[in-house]
Structure formats: C-alpha cells, structure tokens
C-alpha cells in the first residue's frame, strides 16, 4: 500500500517527528468534493487522525496569531497560504495528536506545498485519496452547506475552482505518475462514496489479519506434526523392545 519514509535523516523537521514513523494519506479533491465528510467516516472505521489544513488555518485566524490577517485575506481570495505556515501547523498537530496515522485533508495544494512538506518532514504519503467530482455538483454543495464560511460565496468558489485546476491537479498528476493515487467517484451519495473509500483502506487490514491467521495455523500444524512424530517414535520403540 505504499511507503512510509523514515524521517530520521531530516534535520529541519522540528525534532520529534524525526524519531517516529508515520503513515500519512493525503486526501485531495476540489472544494466541495466531500473530503471532510469522508475523512470523518475514515476516522471512525480505521483509527486515523484527521487533519484538515483548511480547518487548521481557520483556527489560526481565530487564535489571533500574527499571521491571522494574512491567512484570512488569502482564504477570502481562494489563494494558497505560504507552505511554511501550513506545514508548521500540520507538524504541530501531528506531534500533539499522539497518533501515528494521519489523513491530511486539503493539502498539498500545489507543487511547492508538496515538495516543501516532503523535504521538511521527510514523510512521503502512503497514497493519495482523490475525490473526483464535477464542478456543477461541487458548486451546488458549497452553496447549500451553510457552514458560515467566508469563502463559500460564488465569487470565491469560482476562484477556488481555478486554483484547484491550475495548481492542485498537477500534484495529483505527480502522484499518479508514481502509482499512488486511489481515485474515488465522489459525485454519489455519502454512503456509496464511503463504500468505495472503505475498499481502499480495507485490503491492508485484511491482509494483516490473514497473515496473522495463517502464521498461527502454520505453527499449530507444525506442533501437531511434531507431536505425531513423537507418538510414532514412542510406539515404534515399544513394539520393537
Ligand atoms: N488553504 C491553503 N492551504 C491549504 C489548505 C487550505 O491555503 O493547505 C486555504 C485556501 O485558501 C483554501 C481555503 O484554505 O481555498 C479553504 O480550504 P479547505 O481545504 O478548507 O476547503 P476546500 O476548498 O477544500 O473546500
Ligand atoms: Mg474541507
């Protein structure tokens, strides 16, 4: 299912990320494709920690940080916040979570985001979950969701679509060329989309279970064979003596 890079040789990763091995899945797709909704389901079923880059940035605005105004302006324009800001927030959240497997939702949004994350943390994603959906459907969802987001208005939505096509799709293409993209048809109802998502996450767990099961039955059979040999030996000795 892909690789997890040991980050131990990276120096610029802020310390403790370097000592651990992390499983990271990037969750990408246009605005309104259902990333957040499906991540919540994945968390429940597969024990990942969900880190939404957008949510972390919105929390940073609320916290009154010195970057708050800059972030707010970028989000209003549908632009991509500088990598170093987003990566710091992601690293902090990973360290604080105590978990070792993460769904990173809505990041990386451009090639620079992607390259910076890999070089700063030394972590390569195991795979990329890509939610594919038409703009008409995404627009309909964004205008109906009423989450009070400043960027869910038609002007900003159009800008976000443009940024997605121009900057984020190349990231997906990059990972496609590495065979790491798991594409999901995200235009269907939530439950149906989750069935497809489950199929992507399940094989690894199942394989592990099967392996353990077959390991156990192999040891059992070996034990029985050895026991059988001993009995045979015992009887042969008795009969011949
Ligand atoms: N954003 C960003 N970098 C990220 C994630 C989000 O700059 O890594 C900004 C960007 O302006 C984006 C907004 O936050 O349009 C909302 O992102 P989110 O992922 O919450 O929403 P989506 O557009 O995927 O619905
Ligand atoms: Mg989201």
Image (tube, rainbow, N blue to C red):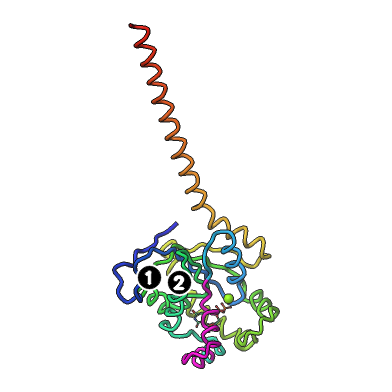
Say whether marks 1 and 2 touch (CB < 8 Å). yes
Which label's residue is closer to the chain start, 1 or 2? 1
Left or right: where does residue 36 sit relative to residue 220?
right
Residue interval drawn in magenta: 51-72
Residue 200's disc number: none
Secondary element type, mark 2: helix
Q: Quadrant of residue 236?
A: top left
Q: Residue at x 48, y 84 (%)?
A: 80
Secondary element type, mark 1: helix
Give residue 79's position: percent from left, percent from top: 51, 86
Left or right: where does residue 191 sit relative to residue 77?
right
Does the Cβ of the disc 1 residue fall within 8 Å of ligand 1?
no
Residue 94's disc number: 2
Tell whether position 19 is magenta: no
Q: Is residue 110 above or below residue 67?
A: above
Tell whether position 70 is magenta: yes
Give residue 161's position: percent from left, percent from top: 57, 81
Does the Cβ of the disc 2 residue fall within 8 Å of ligand 1?
no
Residue corresponding to mark 1: 17
Quadrant containing the C terminus is top left
Left or right: where does residue 139 sit relative to residue 79?
right
Residue nearest the viewer, comparing 150 with 109:
150
């Amino acid at each position: 299912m892909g690789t997890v890079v040991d980050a131990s040789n990276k120096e610029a990763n802020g310390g403790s990320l370097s000592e651990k091995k992390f499983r990271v899945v990037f969750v990408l797709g246009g605005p309104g494709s259902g990333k957040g909704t499906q991540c919540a389901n994945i968390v429940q079923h597969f024990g990942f920690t969900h880190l939404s880059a957008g949510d972390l940035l919105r929390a940073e605005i609320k916290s009154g940080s010195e970057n708050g105004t800059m972030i707010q302006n970028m989000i209003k324009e549908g632009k991509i916040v500088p990598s170093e800001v987003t990566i710091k927030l992601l690293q902090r959240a990973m360290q604080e979570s105590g978990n070792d497997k993460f769904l990173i939702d809505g990041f990386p949004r451009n090639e620079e985001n992607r390259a910076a994350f890999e070089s700063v943390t030394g972590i390569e994603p195991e795979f990329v979950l890509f939610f594919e959906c038409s703009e008409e459907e995404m627009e309909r969802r964004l205008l109906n969701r009423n989450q009070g987001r400043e960027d869910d208005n038609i002007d900003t939505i159009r800008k976000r679509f443009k940024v997605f096509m121009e900057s984020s799709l190349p990231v997906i293409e990059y990972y496609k060329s590495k065979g790491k993209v798991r594409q999901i048809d995200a235009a269907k109802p939530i439950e149906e989309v989750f069935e497809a998502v489950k199929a992507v996450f399940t094989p690894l767990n199942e394989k592990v279970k099967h392996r353990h099961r077959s390991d156990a039955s192999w040891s059992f059979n070996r034990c029985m064979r050895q026991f059988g040999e001993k009995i045979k030996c015992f009887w042969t000795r008795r009969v011949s003596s």
